[in-house]
Amino acid sequence: MCAWHHLGTREELLARVPFALKLDRQQVALFHHEGVFRAIGNRCNHKGGPLCEGQVRGEFVMCPWHAWEYSVVTGKGPPGYDEEAVPTFPVEERADGIWLDTDPRTPRRLVKHDPHPLTVLTPRGDGPPRVVGISTTGMDAVNPRLSTSDLLLEAALGHAASALGAETRLLRLRDLAFRACEGNYSKAAHACTWPCAITERDPDDQLTPVYEALVQWADVVLVATPIRWGQASSLYHRMAERLNCIQNQMTIHNRCLIHSKVAAFIITGGQDNVQGVAGGLLTFWAELGFVFPQFPFIAHSRGWDAEDMENNVRDVRQSSALHAAAGELVGRAVELWRTLPRAGTPDRPMERSGRKAQPLFPAGGGEG
Ligand code: FES
């Protein structure tokens, strides 16, 4: 039931604004703008971000999660986006303080947006195995060098196509201009969304082919990385941070985007820590929902004191054993994939207790 409520004295509220309150099942954000108290719904239309925690510039508050804006006066978006609106609530300043009516003066208005293509996931049909290779080494495209991880990745993809009858794709992260993760997860679990908020709003961001391959097209993913100071490459980590939005769907929605998909790894370096790099890769890709074949990586390193990199390149190029190992790796991955269940859509729940976020809108959360 909606009604007028006494919120406090002017001085009490001035000491607190902006802040959120819940009254009569409404979630309200209270602001003070140009000498007047203003109340709008606290939930952002996009994904429910808390507007009371946003930055206020002029009459507009910017959602702290992904920067949608609303007028604290009218509840509408800025010019050009003003079909979108959060509710506004009447506020009165009376002799005994500030009063608010929980019956909205203007309603929430949600504009229907076309679904992002990444949200439309279809069941896998019949057909040959699909293998995507992800190259994570960086180099100058105009004056490229020979990369040992790329060399073995290309050998694996070649084997997949010629010996296993697979369809293959090669994605080189160095050819894709994509932004670093902006850490929305660190604001709130529900602020990290699928598709990634960067992908949704920045048409120039080029990580979409990676997302599409991982959640939709590919059955087998081969990730190839050099060892850089004992770790996977910086490009690998730049991509991995952006894949948090896949893992996070399990945390916040019990929604598994990766089903019946296999990952395997190629790790090469002039220096050591193969086991450390493999451990990080296995942990992360397991958290995304991938499964692994027996012996899920191949690797080559000549050790900590092997600074003669030209010999490292020569060794890998000339090693028939490593080239054979690359083929065998993808063979094991495809063989495992052939045994996995195919039924169902790629996006479905999975039992996995123990890593759950709080619900975004607890029961009885109200409209505002
Ligand atoms: S902009 Fe508000 S939740 Fe995304």
Image (cartoon, helix red, strand yellow):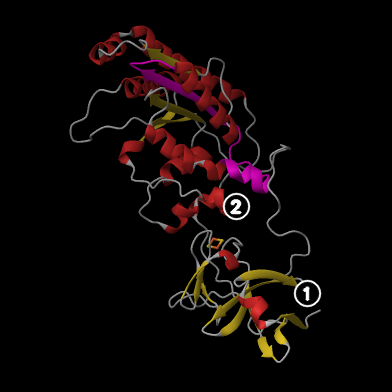
Quadrant in the picture for the C terminus: bottom right
Can residue 194 be seen here? The reply is no
Label 2 CB less than 8 angstroms from ligand 1 = no
Can residue 355 be seen here? The reply is yes
> What percent of the width, then of the height, locates residue 235?
38, 35
322 vs 2: above or below: above
- The image quarter in which residue 131 lies: top left
Tell me, for residue 188, which label it has, or none: 2
Could you tell me if the residues under marks 1 and 2 are in contact, i.e. CB atoms within 8 Å?
no
> What percent of the width, then of the height, locates residue 93?
66, 89
Q: Residue furthest left?
A: 143
Mark 2 residue type:
Ala
**Under tag 2, what secondary structure?**
loop
Give the residue pinned by disc 1: 24
Split into quadrants, the picture shows ligand 1 in the one at bottom right
Residue 152 falls left or right of residue 27: left
Mark 1 residue type:
Asp
Name the residue at 42% across, 25% down: 231
Q: Is residue 42 magenta?
A: no
> What percent of the width, then of the height, locates residue 340?
62, 27
Quadrant in the picture for the N terminus: bottom right
Residue 84 falls left or right of residue 320: right
Of the residues under marks 1 and 2, which one precedes in the sequence?
A: 1
Q: Nearer the viewer, residue 15 or 275?
A: 15
Q: Magenta span covers which residues?
A: 247-273
Q: Nearer the viewer, residue 271 or 174?
A: 271
Q: Is residue 248 magenta?
A: yes
Name the residue at 36% across, 37% down: 173
340 vs 345: above or below: above
